[in-house]
C-alpha cells in the first residue's frame, strides 16, 4: 500500500531530493542514522533528546514516510546545526540506497530485525530485508561507528559487513559495550527501572560501575532503545565534540521522556478500565515484547485482557501468528481476544499450548471483539491493545463507550484516528476490502 504520487508531485519530490543532496553536502552537521524493524521511532526520539542537550539537532518527523521525510529534514539542516538525525524506514528493495544518496552518517544504529515487510508485495523475504537494512552500516566510513543490537542474531551478524568500529548493546556482559542484567528490570504501568552497565574497556562513563535508570517509557524493548541512545550520546561527546558532561544529564533526560500515544502508553479506558495502548505498530518482535511486558507488570486491581489485531506484510503469516499463540500460553494474561483471519492461528495455538479455551476468543472484526469485551470486562481491568495503525483497533474502545461505529474493515488506507474519520458511522467499503 505504498504511496504513488502523480507526475507533477513526483517531479516536485525529485527536485526537492536533488536540492537536499546538494544542500546537505555543504552542511557541517554530524549525521546520525537509525534503522531496524522495531524501535526506530523511540530510539530516534531518545537520541534527539540527548543530542539536543549537546547542541542544536535537526531530526526527521515521526509522522512522515521517510522517503519524503529524509530530504525534507536535510533541507532543514542549517550551518549552525550540530547534529542531523535521520530515522530510516524501508519496505521495498532499493529504498536504503535512496536514503544514502542524500545522507552520509558517521554513526548508525540498527535496533533489531523482525519479519515485517517480508511479503511478496514488499521485500519478498527476510533475507532481502536484512540485506536492505545492512546497507546502512556498509556505507559507514572506517572512522564511523556501527551501534548494533547484540541480542538480535540477524543484527549481530551484520558486523562482518562494515569497516566502521562496532559497539554492541544487549544483555550479554561478555560481548556488549553497554548491557543490562534482565534481573534488574522492574516494569510498571508508570514506567521502567533497570540497571545499566558499561564495559570497562571504553571507560568513558560513570556508568562503568552501573547505575539505575528510571524512565516513564513502558516495556522491555525500551531498555534497548535507551542503551542505543546512550552509546550515541557517549560517542558524540568523546569522539566528535570532546566535551565532558555528567551522566546525570543523560539520566535526567531519559527520566523526563513520556510515552508516545499508541506506543505502549497508559490511558484511561471506557467503563473505568485502564488501557495499555500499543496500537500503532505490530510485528512479531514488537508483539512478543508487548505481551511479555503485559505479563510482567504486577497488576492486582483487575484482569489483564489482551486484544490483538493481525500482523501484516509477513513472509509466513501463519507461522508467525502461531508463535504468538504459543507464547501467550506461557504468560500471565487472563483473557485474549484475537481479531482477523490470521489471528485464528494465534487463538488456536494458544489453546493447543495450554491456555484456557474459555478465556481465548477469536472474532472476525472489531464489532465482534467489542461485544466479547463488553461481556467479560470489569471496572479496573487492564486492556492491552496491540495492532498496527491501519488495523484501527481503537474502534473496539469506541464501541465499548457506545459510539456509533459503522466501519468493520480489518484493514483500511487511512492514517487518522477513527474518531475523526468521515467513514466512522457509514463504514468504509473499498472494492475488495476485507471485512
Image (cartoon, helix red, strand yellow):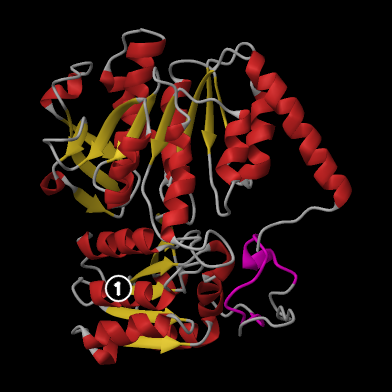
Q: Tell me: 99 left or right of 426.
A: left
In the image, is residue 68 part of the stretch drawn in magenta?
no
Please identify the quadrant where the N terminus is shown: bottom right
Residue projecting furthest to the right: 8
Up-down relation of residue 405 to residue 24 (above or below): below
Name the foreground residue: 155 vs 405.
Answer: 155
Residue at 26% from the left image edge and 34% from the top image edge? 168
Residue 391, image x and y in percent? 55, 70
Nearer to the camera, 6 or 60: 6
Figure disc tally: 1
Residue at image mark 1:
323
The location of residue 30, given as percent across then percent down, is: 50, 18
Regarding residue 149, the answer to whether it shows in the image is yes
Q: Give the range drawn in magenta.
A: 405-422
372 lies above or below 430: below
Q: Is residue 412 magenta?
A: yes
Secondary structure at badge 1 equals: helix
Residue 238, quarter of picture: top left
Q: Which of 160 and 171 is in front in this view?
A: 160
**Which residue is depicted at the point 47% across and 74% down?**
310
Give whichever of 289, 176 is nearer the camera: 176
Residue 416 screen position, x and y as percent: 65, 60
Position of the C terminus, as image quadrant, is: bottom right
Could you tell me what secondary structure mostly forms the magenta stretch? loop
In the image, farthest residue toward the bottom: 358
- Classed neighbour count for the residue bearing mark 1: other residues with Cα under 10 Å, few (<14), some (14–19), many (≥20): some
Amino acid at each position: 500500500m505504498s504511496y504513488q504520487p502523480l507526475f507533477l508531485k513526483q517531479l516536485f519530490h525529485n527536485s526537492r531530493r536533488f536540492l537536499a543532496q546538494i544542500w546537505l553536502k555543504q552542511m557541517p552537521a554530524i549525521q546520525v542514522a537509525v534503522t531496524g524493524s522495531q524501535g526506530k521511532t523511540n530510539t530516534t526520539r531518545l537520541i534527539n533528546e540527548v543530542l539536543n542537550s549537546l547542541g542544536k539537532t535537526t531530526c526527521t518527523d515521526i509522522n512522515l514516510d521517510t522517503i519524503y521525510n529524509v530530504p525534507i529534514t536535510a533541507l532543514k539542516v542549517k550551518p549552525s546545526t550540530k547534529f542531523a538525525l535521520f530515522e530510516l524506514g524501508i519496505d521495498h528493495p532499493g529504498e536504503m540506497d535512496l536514503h544514502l544518496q542524500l545522507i552520509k552518517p558517521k554513526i548508525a544504529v540498527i535496533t533489531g530485525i523482525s519479519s515485517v515487510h517480508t511479503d511478496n508485495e514488499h521485500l519478498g523475504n527476510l533475507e532481502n530485508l536484512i540485506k536492505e537494512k545492512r546497507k546502512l552500516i556498509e556505507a559507514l566510513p572506517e572512522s564511523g561507528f556501527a551501534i548494533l543490537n547484540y541480542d538480535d542474531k540477524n543484527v549481530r551478524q551484520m558486523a562482518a559487513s562494515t569497516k566502521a568500529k562496532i559497539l554492541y548493546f544487549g544483555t550479554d556482559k561478555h560481548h556488549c559495550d553497554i548491557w543490562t542484567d534482565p534481573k534488574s528490570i522492574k516494569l510498571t504501568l508508570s514506567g521502567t527501572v533497570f540497571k545499566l552497565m558499561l564495559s570497562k574497556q571504553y571507560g568513558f562513563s560513570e556508568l562503568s560501575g552501573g547505575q539505575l535508570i528510571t524512565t516513564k517509557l513502558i516495556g522491555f524493548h525500551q531498555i534497548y532503545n535507551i542503551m542505543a541512545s546512550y552509546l550515541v550520546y557517549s560517542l558524540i561527546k568523546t569522539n566528535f565534540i570532546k566535551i565532558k558532561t555528567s551522566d546525570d544529564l543523560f539520566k535526567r533526560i531519559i527520566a523526563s521522556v513520556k510515552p508516545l500515544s499508541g506506543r505502549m502508553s497508559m490511558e484511561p479506558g471506557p467503563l473505568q478500565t485502564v488501557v495499555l495502548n500499543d496500537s500503532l505498530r505490530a510485528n512479531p518482535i514488537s508483539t512478543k515484547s508487548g505481551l511479555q511486558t503485559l505479563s510482567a507488570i504486577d497488576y492486582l486491581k483487575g484482569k489483564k485482557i489482551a486484544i490483538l489485531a493481525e500482523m501484516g506484510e509477513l513472509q509466513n503469516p501463519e507461522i508467525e501468528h502461531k508463535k504468538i499463540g504459543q507464547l501467550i500460553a506461557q504468560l500471565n494474561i487472563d483473557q485474549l481476544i484475537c481479531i482477523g483471519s490470521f489471528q485464528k492461528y494465534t487463538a488456536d495455538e494458544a489453546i493447543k499450548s495450554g491456555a484456557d479455551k474459555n478465556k481465548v476468543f477469536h472474532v472476525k472484526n472489531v464489532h465482534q471483539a467489542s461485544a466479547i469485551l463488553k461481556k467479560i470486562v470489569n471496572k479496573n481491568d487492564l486492556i492491552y491493545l496491540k495492532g498496527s495503525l491501519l488495523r484501527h483497533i481503537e474502534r473496539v474502545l469506541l464501541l465499548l463507550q457506545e459510539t456509533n461505529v459503522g466501519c468493520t474493515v480489518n484493514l483500511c488506507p487511512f492514517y487518522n484516528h477513527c474518531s475523526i474519520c468521515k467513514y466512522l458511522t457509514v463504514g468504509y467499503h473499498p472494492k475488495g476490502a476485507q471485512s
